[in-house]
Amino acid sequence: MDDDTILEAFDPEIAKFVEVLLKNGNVGVFGGSIRVLEPKTGQYIISQKGCCDRFRVQVPFAGSTLTWQVIFNSVFPENPPDFMFGPQERTFIPELENVKSLVNWDASNPDCLLVVIKELIHLYKEFQENLLRNYSRMQFEYTSLLELDTGKFNDVELLLARKGVRDTSVNFLIKLPVDFSEIPEFLTKDNPGEDLAVLLVSFQNVESNKALPQLYLSPRVEHALGGSASLRIPAFPTGGCLMDYVPNVCELLGNMVDQLVKGYQKRSEYIAAFLSHFGRSVLEYDVESFSKISIMFEMQDFYFTMHITLPAYFPRDQPEFMFQSIYHTGTHSKPYTAIVKDYPYSPRWSGNEMAERARIYLNEYIADFKRASVSQIRVR
């Protein structure tokens, strides 16, 4: 069901609470969306459209999903709802007086159901923390991480999930405190939302010294860093601890962001240097990402263009030069070109030195390119 169809199923006095869940129900460490499922009515009627007053909510928590039932009474829609928790939460029975937003229910406020659910999530987290105290190994993992670096890694969700009669797995979902604010705007402008990175570490059982880590990034950050294929984190070492592993992953991600930002700054410096050296000859350049520049040259009555492409991890990776004749065509009747990747280069040079070295190389290379374009023999 789409959101509109779901809302149409509810009693109007209840639909206003559901609408807030659908539009603004982002909760938890990763800001996942609350899902509304299976709208039903407690009345004995043939058609349920516009009469539903109970439903299930799926709440993201610690890399898993909690399924709770919310029960209103459409005869008295101003009354607060009841909640039924799932089989995994059968011992989760919060005291009513601890759910302040439910005790002080205000039916005139459309946000009040979302506030109640957020408060229940907080109480459920405390419930999981209490369960964890029964397992010294996992309790050490959790408390040592929270105490690390004056609470730097304190935004954590944990979940103990029974997998059988004896086995209980443990999930830790940790928000990584990485600063993404310096990422160039052009990389994130088409991806709205929060800049976020979380690490899910799953232990097979409460005594396990092995764990499976998974890194999750918000769409903005994932796009800026080049997609999921470029984001590989180290395996969790056998016998390792969260207090050692999590800071390492955080540092790795921070270094990637730092490399991205510095690369952008160096590309800007590089393009500025070429504009300074060859300003009147520049045809165009990328003013947003500073990844390309095209220049027209004339040497000995021979006109040609030079297209420079800067890689994502510049200056570590060397730019590519493509020379293009404006007179001669090669295969498929396209302008004759030669791509050069092997020329004097050092990532330690300044932008000005790179431009000057390119000018020197250009003077040495262009005679070969001219002969090749005239004779249609590609320069190797």
Image (tube, grey):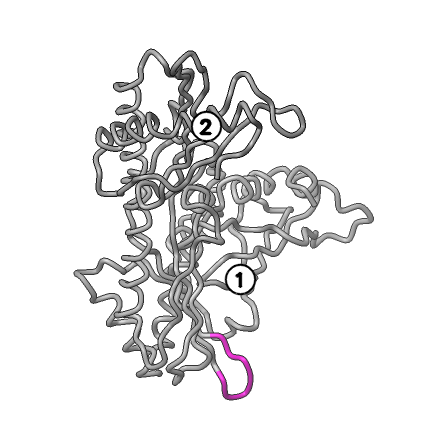
State whether the magenta stretch is mostly helix, strand or loop.
loop
Residue 59 as seen in the image, left or right of residue 293:
right
Residue at the extreme bottom of the image, as rendered: 166
Residue 94 as seen in the image, left or right of residue 59:
left
Which residue is nearer to you in this view: 127 or 183?
Answer: 183
Which residue is nearer to you in this view: 293 or 127?
Answer: 293
Which residue is nearer to you in this view: 313 or 163?
Answer: 313
Q: Is residue 319 above or below residue 373?
A: below
Q: Position of residue 165 (x, y in %)?
A: 54, 87
Q: Is residue 288 above or below residue 238?
A: above
Q: Position of residue 342 (x, y in %)?
A: 38, 42
The part of the image, by quadrant, that contains residue 368 is top left
What segment is highlighted magenta in the picture? 161-167
Name the residue that disc number 1 marks: 65
The part of the image, by quadrant, that contains residue 365 is top left
| Amino acid type, callout 2 | Phe
Q: Position of residue 355 (x, y in %)?
A: 27, 28
SS for dot 2: helix
Q: Check the picture and name the quadrant holding the N terminus.
A: top right
Is residue 275 located in the magenta-colored stretch of the structure? no
Which residue is nearer to you in this view: 207 or 249?
Answer: 249
| Amino acid type, callout 1 | Thr
The disc placed on residue 369 is 2
